[in-house]
Image (tube, coloured by chain):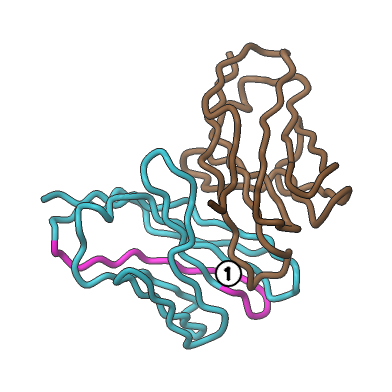
Amino acid sequence: EAQVTQNPRYLITVTGKKLTVTCSQNMNHEYMSWYRQDPGLGLRQIYYSMNVEVTDKGDVPEGYKVSRKEKRNFPLILESPSPNQTSLYFCASSFRADNYNEQFFGPGTRLTVL
Amino acid sequence: GNSVTQMEGPVTLSEEAFLTINCTYTATGYPSLFWYVQYPGEGLQLLLKATKADDKGSNKGFEATYRKETTSFHLEKGSVQVSDSAVYFCALTQNTGFQKLVFGTGTRLLVSP
């Protein structure tokens, strides 16, 4: 089944404890992206990747890192999480980066930073 | 910059009622427009899209028409079902070859039997 998977689905952590949220897609997509969803703000892009080893900042990159060493994986790294990073995170992918390609979203990761 | 404005929710309807969720946008050039739906506990799914003015996107009984003159892309359905209860997001991308989705804040729809 074609899908985007994220792990973990739920995570409660404490301030300053490094964490990684994994994202994997099995559709051989070039483009991958991370969003955060907050009430009243919709979804905002954190980072994106046009292809392997090519990543760039989105609208709200502060406090986050990403890597794209393989085409299928795009982990989101929080080196020192803070409470303002409590949010619902979505990974998405599409065949290419042009705007005619549908983006497929993962099921989401709900992160709470205490 | 580009932006999308949606009506605030929740929108509460009875089954078989007519649905309209308003969406207007601000963008330079000629964006592509999308409606995504998020069912409880799930990620977003593309519902429909339109890539140029006067195009009508449709899927699962939902429709939206790209109106350049009013910069709008309102979502409509003639008869909603309980299973349509979800959060609906309007979004756009620029037609510049690079897909960056700009989302509205989302509108929650609650349909009661």
**Magenta region includes residue A39:** no
Residue at 65% of width from left, 50% of height from top? Answer: A26
Q: Residue furthest bottom?
A: B54
Residue marked by disc 1: B26
Vertical comparison of A1 with A22: above or below: below
Quarter holding residue A35: top right
**Amino acid, disc 1:** Thr
Towards the viewer: B10 or A4: A4
> The chain drawn cyan is chain what?
B
Residue at 63%, 11% (x, y): give it: A14
Q: Crowding at label 1, few (<14), some or many (≥20) Cα neighbours within 10 Å?
A: some
Say left or right for A53 vs A104.
right
Report the number of numbered marks.
1
- Picture quadrant where residue B32 is located: bottom right
Please report the bounds of the magenta region as a residue range. Answer: B16-32
Is residue B110 placed above or below A67 in the rendered structure? below
Q: Give the residue drawn at x 70%, y 43%.
A: A46
Is residue B28 shown above or below B80? Answer: below
Residue B69, position as x, y percentages in the image? 49, 85
In this rendering, would B62 be left or right of B101? Answer: left
- Residue A51 in which image quadrant: bottom right
Is the residue B54 above or below the residue B63 in the image?
below
**A84 or B86: which is nearer to us?**
B86
Farthest residue to the front: give it: A1
Q: Residue shown at 63%/27% (left/top)?
A: A85
Q: Is residue B92 left or right of residue A76?
A: left
Q: In front: A1, or A66?
A: A1
Q: Position of residue A57 (x, y in %)?
A: 79, 47
Element at badge 1?
strand
The chain whose colour is brown is A
Report the chain holding disc 1: B
